[in-house]
Amino acid sequence: MDEVRVVEGSQAIARAVKLCQPDVISAYPISPQTHIVENLAQMAADGELKSEMILVESEFSAASAVTGASAAGGRAYTASSSQGLLLMTEVIYNAAGMRLPFVITGVNRSVSAPISIQIDQQDSVSLRDSGIIQFYAESSREAYDMHLMAFRIAEDPEILLPVMVCIDGWILTHNYEQVVFLDQETVDRFLPPFKPQQFLDIARPLTYGSHAEDDVLMEMKYSIHDAMIRAKGRIKEIIDEYAQLTGRYYSGLTEAYRTEGAEVILLGMGSMMGTAKDAVDEMREKGIPVGLIRVLCYRPFPYEDILAGTRGAKVVSVMDNNFSMGSEGAMGMDLKAKFCNLEDHPLVLNFITGLAGREVGKETIWQIVDRSRVIESMGRPELESYWVDLNKEILPSGGVP
Amino acid sequence: MKRSLDQQEELFAPGHRACPGCGEAILCRMVLKTTGRNVIVVSPTGCIETFTSPYLYSPWRVPWIHPLFENAPSIASGIAGVLKAKGMDKEIKVVVIAGDGATFDIGLGALSGMFERGDNVTYICADNEAYGNTGFQRSAATSLRASTTTEPAGKLSLGKSRPKKNLPAIATAHGIAYVATTSIAYPRDLQRKVKKALNIDGAKYIEVSIPCCSGWGFDPKLTIEVARLGVQSGLVPLYEIEAGEITKVHKIKKRVSVEEYLKAQGRFRHLFQSEKGKQELVKIQEVADHNIERLGLL
C-alpha cells in the first residue's frame, strides 16, 4: 500500500535514497548541505538504514568516497550544493572518466562571490562538461521519483556514469509537499542490487585510472560522450519501466506544456517552470499563443525533443538560471548551437532570470513573453542575452539591458 | 613471512617503467609480497601512477586504482566502506601507496579526515622527499638544506630553509591505531610493520624512506646503500607508535655521521662547498643527535 504524506523535500529525497539501499553514503555538512543527509544519518542511527555513513572533511572527499565505493562495486550516494559542487568538480570528471556510477543530489544555490545561500543553477550547470548526467526537478515528488530512477540510469551497463539530480534550494528542499511513497518491494523490483561487470575485484584484478596519451585518450573521451548520447534512449526506456511499475508517468527528457500552436515557447528547467506553467495558462486564457518546454535532463542535452517541440514556433525564449561570464546563459548557447545549422528554425532569445533566488513570478514570465513578442516582431534581438529585472540604477556602468 | 623475499609470491610484475634503481618500485614489490592477493591498492597521482599504468600495461597483479593527486585517502575510505557493508573487510585489506607530495602536501586534508574517522586503511607513504615525477620540486617532506628545483641551492640559498614536516607526529595526534616509520634498506622491518598494520582494525600510517637516485643524485646501484646510511646516521629514525606511545625503535648497529649520508647525494653537495654550508652540516648533525637521544636509537 502506497503511503501518502506531506513532507519536506529533503525528507522525501532521503526516503527515496533509503529505498535504494546504498552501500555507502558520504556527506559533508556545510557549503551548504540540506536536511537530506541529516535524515539519512538519523535513519542509520535508528538502524533503519544499513548504509555505511562516511562523514568526510570536505566535499572533495565526499565525491571521492563515493567514487571509491563505486570502484569497489558498491552503490553510493552523496549530496551537495553550490561551493561544494564546485569543490567536487575535479572528482566528478575523474569518476565519469573511469565510468564509475553513483548518485548525487545537487541542491542548486549561488556560487560565491558574493556569498549567498539563495537559489540558482550556476553550480550544477558549471559541471555540464564533466560527464555527469544531470536531471532537474520541478517538484519534491518529481525529485523523489528521479532519485529512484537515477540509480537505475547510473548503473545501467550501457551508461555507467554518475548522475546528479538537481533541485532548487529552499523552494524544493525546504518546502512541504504531498509525496506518495513507494514500498520497498516495488523499488526492489525496479532497482535490483548493483552488480557491476567490472570492479576492484581480488578474483579478477583490474587496473583503474591508467595513464593515457594521444593514442587512446580521444577515444576514451569519445566513449563517455557516446554513452551519454545513447543514454537518451535508455533513460526513456527506464522512465517507461518506472511508469509501468508505479503508474507515475514522465514524458521523457523534456516536458512539453501547451506547445500546440504556440508562437512563443519558453524553455527552462527547475522549480521556476511550475510558475511559468501558471503564467502560460493565464496567457492562453487571454488568447496569447504561448507554450513551454521544461528540460528534465540537461546532460545529455535533449535537443532532438526540443527541435521537435518547437517546430512551427516563431521564437524560443530560453530562461537561464545561470550565466557564462563573457558569453551568455548556458542553455541559450546550447540551443543556438543546435539550431544554427538548420535551414529553418525559430528565433532563439536568452533571458537570465532568478540569480540568487530573485523572484521569478508570473509577472516575470509575462514580461519575458511580452518582450519576446516585441523582439520577434522587429526581426532580430539587439542583445544575445537579456538580464531580467536588472536594476540599472545600482550598476556602476549604468548597465546594458 | 619466514621465507625470503625471493620466495614470496611476486604480485608486482617486472617490466614497469620506473627509473633503474627506483626506491619506490622496490617498495611496491615488498608491500605486495607482504599483503598477498587479498588487497585493493590505491595510489594517487605521482611516480607510481606514471611508471605502473601506461594504458594497456600494468604490473599490478592485484586490483589497483589511481584516482587523483589529493584524494587517495577518501577513495580508500569509500572502498573500505563497501567492504564493510558487504562483510568482506576482514578478508580484503585496503592499502594506499602514495608519494610524499600527495601525503604531506596536497592530500593532507583528506588524510587527516581518514585518520580522524579511523577508517580501516593502511596508508603507506613512499617518501622520497620531493615531487620526483615532475622534476624534483620541493615538498613539505624535503629535508632541511636539500636542493630541489623549486628551492635550489644558489649564491644566496643553501637549499630548503625549513625542516621536514613531522607527519608521524601529526598522524599520532589523530589517535590512530598504529604509526610506524621504516626503510627499504630493512625489508624484514618493513614487512613486519606492514603485516602488523594489516592486522590492526582502523587507520594506520607507515612512512617509508625511499631514496630517489635521479632526484637525490647518486648512482642507481646505491639506492639501498643510501637508504641504509640515512637510518645509520639517525636522520631517518625507524620506530613504531601504538596508542600514542613509542613502543619499539630500530637500534642503529653501526652509526655513521650525517656527512657520510649527505655527501653520498648530489642534493646536499652545496653544503660541502662553503663555510656557511659547513655550519649547516653541524646543525643537521644536531638533528640526528637529537633523534638518537630522544628515541634511544643506540
Image (tube, coloured by chain):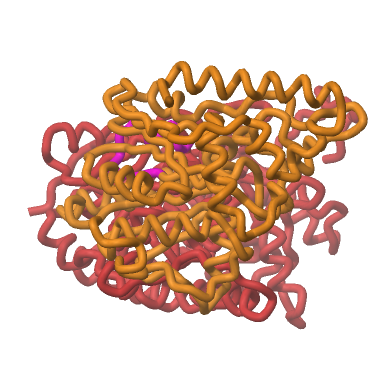
Chain colours: A red, B orange
Seen from the viewer's position, the closer of residues A21 and B103 is B103
The correct choice, above or below, for B81 with respect to A216 in the image is above
Seen from the viewer's position, the closer of residues B107 and A275 is B107
Q: Quadrant of residue B142?
A: top right
B122 in the magenta segment = yes
Q: Residue at x 23, y 57 (%)?
A: B2
Does residue A174 show up?
Answer: no
B119 in the magenta segment = yes
Report x, y in % for residue B121: 32, 44
Report x, y in % for residue A71: 37, 61
Seen from the viewer's position, the closer of residues A229 and B149 is B149
Judge left or right: residue A244 versus residue A270.
Answer: left
The correct choice, above or below, for B174 with respect to A379 in the image is above
Judge left or right: residue A48 versus residue A8.
Answer: left
Q: Residue at x 54, y 45 (%)?
A: B227
Q: Residue at x 42, y 61 (%)?
A: B29
The quadrant the C terminus of chain A occupies is top right
The correct choice, above or below, for A158 with respect to A46 in the image is below
Report x, y in % for residue A81: 49, 39
Q: Which residues are magenta?
A: B110-123
Q: Residue at x 34, y 49 (%)?
A: B188
Judge left or right: residue A385 versus residue B202.
Answer: right
Report x, y in % for residue A301: 56, 67
The quadrant the N terminus of chain A occupies is bottom left
The correct choice, above or below, for A327 with respect to A55 in the image is below
